Image (tube, helix red, strand yellow):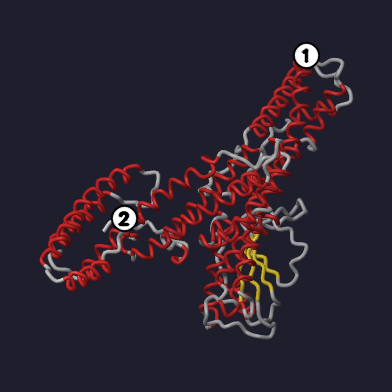
Amino acid sequence: MTSSSARVVWMEQMVSQCFSHQGDEGGHPIDQELKEKFIQFLKGKMGKTLLIYYQKQVKLNDKNPPDSSLNPIYMCNEQTKGIDLQNRACFFIRNIEDDREVNFGVASDETVTFGEMTSDSIIGMNKVIYNYLFQGIDQVQNNEWDKIKDGQKEEFKKVLENFAKDINDTIESFVKGVKFMELPNNVKEYIQQDKKDYIRDEEKQNLVSKIEDVYQSWINTLTEEIEDMDKGNQTSNDIGPRSELERWKFRMQRLTKVNDFFKGEDYRLVSQYFHEQKNKLSSKIQSMINDMKQKKIDSYTAYAEARDNVKYLSTLEIYFDPLYNKGPDNIIDSLQSLMNSLKLISFTARYYDSTKMTNLFSKITSQMINNCIDYILDKKSKNGMANNDPNYLWEQQPDDLIQKFEKCIELYKCYKEKYKQAKTNTTSSNKENNFEFGENQLFGKFEQFCKRLTKLIELFTTIKQFEDIRKHKLDSMDTIQASYDAELEAFKHKTAQLLKYNDTKFDKDYVAFNLKINDIENELHKIINEEFKKLNWIEKKLKLLAKYEKILTKPNL
């Protein structure tokens, strides 16, 4: 009965999925013996760990070679040390006391953990950290955090996320990193021979030519890696400042691999060969050697630049977090500290010049705009899901939207003011010590975005005004209201994305809409004036005036 329980079936499925892409080795069926091992493990009779892997037996006796048709299953409990793992494996870990039986009726819960590993321990560790620890932490229930505060919980998640990402990126850079052409074995043998004169001239010429080709390919690879800042880097959707840090981290990882090349056996062998033949080298090879010396210097210089920039940009990570995960209020609170850190980098970072600082500022500005858009669209309250509903803003309360628009404009003004204060406090006759960059590049996009928000404030103020008129059911306003509704609907159909601030079509449509609204407001003035003319008593006129003053809050009305 237990062999067909939900828990055992789940374990069978996990094992099958683990080996499903291993060809014939993954096709081995889950036999009854393995099921019995599952049951014993779940009952607490096999220790805390169960390791499973498919692997052909390798026998050292030539008279009895391994049977290639067999793919036996190897299982261990606590004795997992010393295993020569040659392929993928999976494991189950009990998270309860040894003498306690796991619930067979539940397929999966926290009492048993499943994982996979490969023969490469680093890649295996990365999978455990990234797939199980980092992603699994989100599955932890609030009551399981016990007395840990929300702020500490988020900080722990952030640290774990960064750790997992750094390991993943580092491993990827090694697996998919810089590739240098390898020396053919016959060339290595030739270089390592003590007496090269016994080799035929034709063969020797071919070998020397091959050495030249490989050496030139190394120079070409080094040139590409040193000069192309983003070579091999995946295009990121992040336009904010984190992308700048990730960019330099990636470059540092690749240049680490480049510099390791100079410590490699192939480079050492060729350098040794050229040194031995220095009196016989052609001018072409001598020129290549000089090129390589320069590439070596350039490589170490480029690595020093990347390492230095990563060191300084990493100090900003704490200030980048509000730009991505908080609202405008939190960003405003962190602006002074952010500006102080940027100023410090500008003055002390050896390689981070004004061009790079301008680019970093531009990315900070872009992320602030993105943050404001997310704030206006309530993205943070929607579990981070993108809100692409074109009707969303039209369905919100005008007062709430106007308040958000004003908060975003406040952020822009505060951001610009903090920059001006930093610039004023550090003005020096020495140009290198000036904290001054192109303001249009720094704030141009944000200013354009705020101009759009100003127009939206006017738009939703108008909408609020006519909604108030509708609520009070004023006399003789039906025609006015119908005209307004028609114009508003026509405008809605023309403008799909109100927050797309670089779309000039909105500006043209908004001007036309405003002209229509002005005509409607003029008609409204006429109706109100006619009502006043009908009244003879001053007292009644004052009451009517008080009534309209309460309803008509738009300045031009």
- What is the count of numbered marks? 2
Mark 1 Cα within 10 Å, few/some/many (few <14, many 20+)? few
Residue 35 shown left or right of residue 385 in the figure:
right
Residue where numbered disc 2 is placed:
459
Question: Of residues 347 and 136, which is closer to you in this image?
Answer: 347
Q: Residue furthest right?
A: 194
Question: Of residues 536 and 178, which is closer to you in this image?
Answer: 536
**Contact check, label 2 and label 1, Cβ < 8 Å:** no
How far across and how far down the image is residue 21, in percent? 54, 55
Q: Which SS class for mark 1?
A: helix
The tag on residue 283 is 1
The tag on residue 170 is none
Q: Which SS class for mark 2?
A: helix
Question: Of residues 210 and 409, which is closer to you in this image?
Answer: 409
Residue 126 shown left or right of residue 401 in the figure:
right
- The residue lying at 64 percent from left, 56 percent from top is 337
Image quadrant of residue 71? Answer: bottom right
The amino acid type, in three-letter code, at marker 2 is Leu
Of labels 2 and 1, earlier in sequence is 1
- The residue lying at 77 percent from left, 54 percent from top is 60
Q: Is residue 324 above or below residue 157?
A: above
Between disc 2 and disc 1, the foreground one is 2
Q: Is residue 350 above or below residue 500?
A: above
How far across and how far down the image is residue 154, in percent? 60, 68
Residue 487 shown left or right of residue 395 in the figure:
left
Can the viewer see residue 71? no
Can the viewer see residue 374? yes
Kindly report the distance in space between the C-alpha atoms of the residues bearing marks 2 and 1: 75 Å
The amino acid type, in three-letter code, at marker 1 is Ser
Image quadrant of residue 479? Answer: bottom left
How far across and how far down the image is residue 8, in percent? 55, 76
